[in-house]
Amino acid sequence: MKLPRIVRLIGKHVVKATPILRRHILPSADYRVLGGVEDARSAAGSSDGWFAARTVSRQERAYRNLIADMHRGEPRLDLRIAAEAVAATGIVSPGLIEIGCGSGYYSEVLAALVPGGIGYTGLDYSEAMIARARARYPSVEFQVGDATRLAFPDNAFDIVFNGVSLMHIVDYQAAIREAARVAGRYCILHTVPVFEAHDTTFLRKYAYGSPVVEVVFSKNELISLCEKAGLRLERQWPCIPYDVAEVTGHRSFTETYLFAKSGVS
Ligand SMILES: C[S@@+](CC[C@H](N)C(=O)[O-])C[C@H]1O[C@@H](n2cnc3c(N)ncnc32)[C@H](O)[C@@H]1O
């Protein structure tokens, strides 16, 4: 039964106005700017963040409707762009690893939306996330591992796909170098929050009830780190809205980037 609009509006207002409710109900709440990388390391180390069982189940629940919409033929913009970026590589049925795969739903999204499908492997450093992914997609390959120290040889996958996880990795420089190393041909950084003209900034927020660290990148710094790692920007797409101007004073947005490994045409 659908509640009357006025009741829904009051409900939303009460959730937003009450810290304990908004932190536990909203996917993102209570942003705070952190002092710098050391502050970010200590904030990340002092929270169970992505390892908490409640984060896993709430994150999965948040995406259930999105997946249902996709199967009804109405994929949200970010899901469409992910598939478009993979298709833009021109590789038929590529071997792809998703770094920071969470509960693994991009395996379903890319299988449904990329013509010809993909050979998918999912990796996440949260055992709880990987356990949920394996339970949900028993025939898909998932591994526990850290984006900053990948246990794969050079050029192991046609495509390294980083879906909404680079922004949660404090040592993002190492994650970019590792992505470039294990990518045989392309790296896709999907839904990356960036500033056009402001320094990379570390934030702390509540995600599904748990404190996590988030990085909003200086676009110039991000692109130049990727170039130093041997990647060349081929295409970019504006993706879903994300503006933290209220806490940083600078407008931010998300983009998806397709990088080719240098020497690959
Ligand atoms: C916002 S979720 C994204 C999940 C999924 N890709 C999606 O698009 O919804 C971020 C994921 O990155 C993972 N993550 C954060 N730091 C990581 C690291 N250093 N190595 C591997 N995974 C990491 C978290 O455990 C979490 O599952």
Image (tube, rainbow, N blue to C red):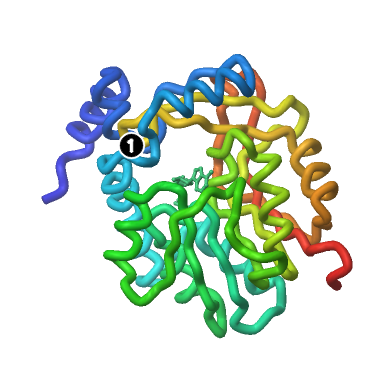
* Residue 57 on image: x %, y %: 27, 48
Q: Residue drawn 22% across and 38% down?
A: 5
Residue with the most extreme left position: 1
Question: In the rendered view of the protein, which quadrant contains the C terminus?
Answer: bottom right
Q: Is residue 220 above or below residue 144?
A: above
Horizontally, residue 93 falls left or right of residue 79, namely right
User: Is the CB atom of the residue marked by disc 1 within 8 angstroms of ligand 1's nearest atom?
Assistant: no
- Residue at left offset 59%, top offset 55%: 150
Q: Label 1: which residue?
A: 208
Q: Quadrant of residue 135?
A: bottom left
Farthest residue toward the top?
35
Q: Can you give x and y, in whole percent of width and height, for residue 132 in the image? A: 30, 57
Q: Height in image: 84 above or below 13?
A: below
The three-letter code of the residue at mark 1 reads Tyr
- In the picture, measured across the screen, residue 88 lies left or right of residue 117, that is right
Which quadrant of the structure image shows residue 28? top left
Residue 19, x across and y down, in percent: 29, 18
Visible residue check, residue 136: yes
The answer to which of 246 and 186 lies nearer the viewer is 186
Q: Residue at x 68, y 79 (%)?
A: 91
Return the x and y of residue 218 as percentages of the image width and height: 73, 33
Name the element at disc 1: loop
The image quarter in which residue 259 lies: bottom right
The residue under the point 62% across, 78% down is 94
Say if residue 237 shows up in the picture: no
Q: Give the side of residue 231 with respect to residue 179, left or right.
A: right
